[in-house]
Amino acid sequence: MKKLNMIYEGKAKQLYTCEREDALIIHYKDDATAFNGAKKAQIEHKGMLNNAISTIIFKEMARAGIPTHYLETLNDRDQLCKKVHIIPLEVIVRNVIAGGMSKRLNIPEGTPSPKPIYELCYKNDELGDPLINEDHALALGVVSESELITIKTLTLQINEVLKKLFDQVGILLVDFKIEFGKTPDGKIVLADEISPDTCRFWDKETMMKLDKDRFRRDLGKVEDAYQEILRRLELIKTV
Ligand code: UDP
C-alpha cells in the first residue's frame, strides 16, 4: 500500500490517502513538540520507535476486545488505519498524580490516586486544549450523550489493559492521553497513537521517567527511554 496525497500534518505525524477509500496511512515523524508547540526538536528514531510501540499496544487492545482504527503496520514509520472522524477530545486517565494536575492542584508528583481519574480536554490548539467536563463536551456539540458513555467505558477498560501490560515489564503507568474516532457507520473506536509521547511511564524500581517528560524537562537520554519501552514490550511479545 503506497502513500498518495498528504492531507494533514500534525506535530508528530502526517496523514496520507492511499489506494483504499476507507483507510489512511499514518506516517510517524521524529519531530517532538511540547508546551503547545513552544518547544520543538527532533528526537532521533522517535518515529520508528513510536510506530513500533503503538503497533504492539494497538494489537494488545484488539486482543482485549477494544475497537480501534488500527489495520496494519506497513513499514518502519507507516501504519494503515481505518479512516475515521477524530472526535476533538483529549481523553486523559491518571493513576498517579503528575504533570498538569500536580501543578494545578498542588498535589506532589508521584501521589497515587485512590481511583483512576478521568479527564477531558477540548482538542483546540488556539485555546490551549482546555480542561472541560462532559457537559461542556455536549455544549460544544462534539459528541453525543451515548457516545460519552461509550468513550468513558472504553477509556477505563483501556486503562486496565495498559496497566496490566506495563506492570508485567516493571513499568508504572502514571497517566496517558487517548483520542477516539467515529467510523462512517457511527462506531466509536480508539484512534491516534499510544506511545511515550502520550503516556507517562515510570520504571517501578527506580522511578526513572521513560517518556516524553525527558524531553519536556530536559532530562536527557530521550531516545534511550523510548527504546527501553520498546525493548520491554518486545519481551512480552516473545513470551
Ligand atoms: N498528553 C498528551 N498530549 C497533550 C497533553 C497531554 O499526550 O497535548 C499526555 C501526557 O503525555 C500525559 C497525560 O496526557 O501522559 C497527562 O498530561 P498532563 O495533563 O499532565 O499534561 P502536561 O501538563 O504534562 O502537558
Image (tube, grey):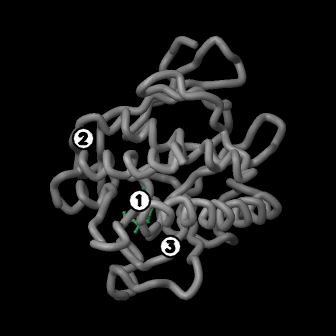
Q: Nearer the viewer, mark 1 or mark 3?
A: 3
Q: Quadrant of ligand 1?
A: bottom left
Does residue 127 appear in this view? no
x, y percentage for residue 20? 68, 16
Q: Secondary structure at mark 1?
A: loop
In the rendered image of this protein, does residue 72 appear above or below residue 114?
A: above
Callout 3 amino acid: Arg
- Distance, label 3 to label 2, CA atoms, is 26 Å
Res 184 quadrant in image: top right
Which dot marks residue 13? none
Callout 1 amino acid: Gly
Residue highlighted by disc 3: 94
Q: Quadrant of the N terminus?
A: top right
In the rendered image of this protein, does residue 219 appear above or below residue 206?
A: above
Residue highlighted by disc 2: 43
Callout 2 amino acid: Ile
Residue under the image location 45 percent in, 84 percent down:
112
Residue under the image location 73 percent in, 65 percent down:
153
Q: Residues within 10 Å of mark 2 (few under 14, many from 20)?
A: some
Which dot marks residue 128? 1
Residue under the image location 45 percent in, 36 percent down:
51
